[in-house]
Image (spheres, grey):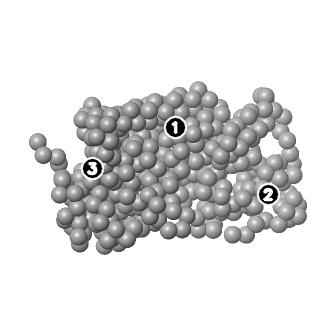
Amino acid sequence: MPILPRRRALALPLAAALAPRPSRAAPLAVTDALGRQITLKATPERIVVNFNFEEFTAVGTPAAWDRVVGMSKALWADWRPSVFRRYQVPIPRLAAMPDIGQTGDGSFSVEKVIALRPDLLLLSEWGYSSLKPQVAQLEALGIPVVVIDYNAQLPERHVASTRALGVVTGQPARGEALAALYLDKLADIQRRAARGVANSGGIRPKVYVELGQAGADTVGNTYWRGMWGRMLDLIGAENIAAGRLAGAGNWGPLNPEYVIAANPDAIFIAGSSWVGRPAAVLTGFDADIATTRARLAPYAQRQGWAGLAAIRTGQIFAIEHGLSRALFDYTAMQFIARQLWPAEFAEIDPEAELRHYHAQWLPVAFEGCWMARLTAPAA
């Protein structure tokens, strides 16, 4: 992806727009997800948002979007159109929001960011990692960059990201409240799961998670050091993918023969509302449980899977993939843990938690099917 030459960037007719503005408040100190210390001259008035749009909304409220001048639009409007469509109702200006491109396909444009005259760029960690020269360029022009990260599934990053969003949107109390909510829910999950392991004689159930984007005929990615993989670590389950992935080891497909040999006790197929993926496991706002189960069923019929402990005991589930990198991902951990240790999580209702979170923190109502068992449990 091209980097705007420094001489050309400095020559752009933006000097006046990028000149320091009179501060109406004391400088703001922000600690981002990576522990970087950023000082803002005041609460930002012109923000560019790269990712974590729902977290930005939950912390900042829909009013925070009045300060947004650009976004990586495809990551929401194209990747999750059913979600984007709902948010356009309470936030109508999303429809015409300028697009800065994204890092995944090389369309991210430094020039577009600069032209928007922002006083803050909120950038995902994976975007930051791939754009370090561009980030240095933007910072040299006086545009601060704050990194937000929920993908790594490190609790300290969840908390730092949420607090940072509170500071930059002028909603520090909401940021603190949501960070506290996350930590409280995580601690409760871990206490219950620890009891479950203890009550099982120290045996941790073996779990396999696979991305259900291309259908059962394709072996999808699984996860280790991040997203679903680290979520399994947080609750104390045994992730059969741990140490088994090539390359960086964060995600990738497992050998089908290894999955059979590992014989997981529970299988979770991560679905969503992907566009142009007719065989994908459908979950989310537009899904109903009958469709979700129908899309999940072919996975249980894979060659060699009939003898797996998970299939024999009916422990195969669909779960919304977006919950692997979200502030309210504790609901996914509750769901997974409830299947592994039903006695310890008997009074926990993950769907009710999702509904409550949406009602309290988000401007859209919860609906659809986000998590489901292939077959209803026996009475």
Up-down relation of residue 294 to residue 46 (above or below) = below
Residue type highlighted by circle 3? Ala
Q: Mark 1, residues whose alpha carbon is within 10 Å: few (<14), some, or many (≥20)?
A: many
* Precedes in sequence: disc 3 or disc 1: 1
Q: Quadrant of residue 309?
A: bottom left
Residue 295, percent from left and from top: 26, 62
Tag in front: 1 or 2:
2
Q: Quadrant of residue 210?
A: bottom left
Mark 3 vs mark 2, CA separation in Å: 46 Å
Question: Would you name the residue on which mark 1 appears?
Answer: 58
Residue 172, percent from left and from top: 62, 29
Q: Nearer the viewer, residue 319 or 53?
A: 319
Residue at position x 39%, y 54% in the image: 239
Residue at position x 82%, y 66% in the image: 5
* Precedes in sequence: disc 1 or disc 2: 1
Residue reaching furthest to the left:
379
Question: Would you name the residue on which mark 2 appears?
Answer: 137
Question: Would you name the residue on which mark 3 appears?
Answer: 372
Q: Nearer the viewer, residue 242 or 378?
A: 242
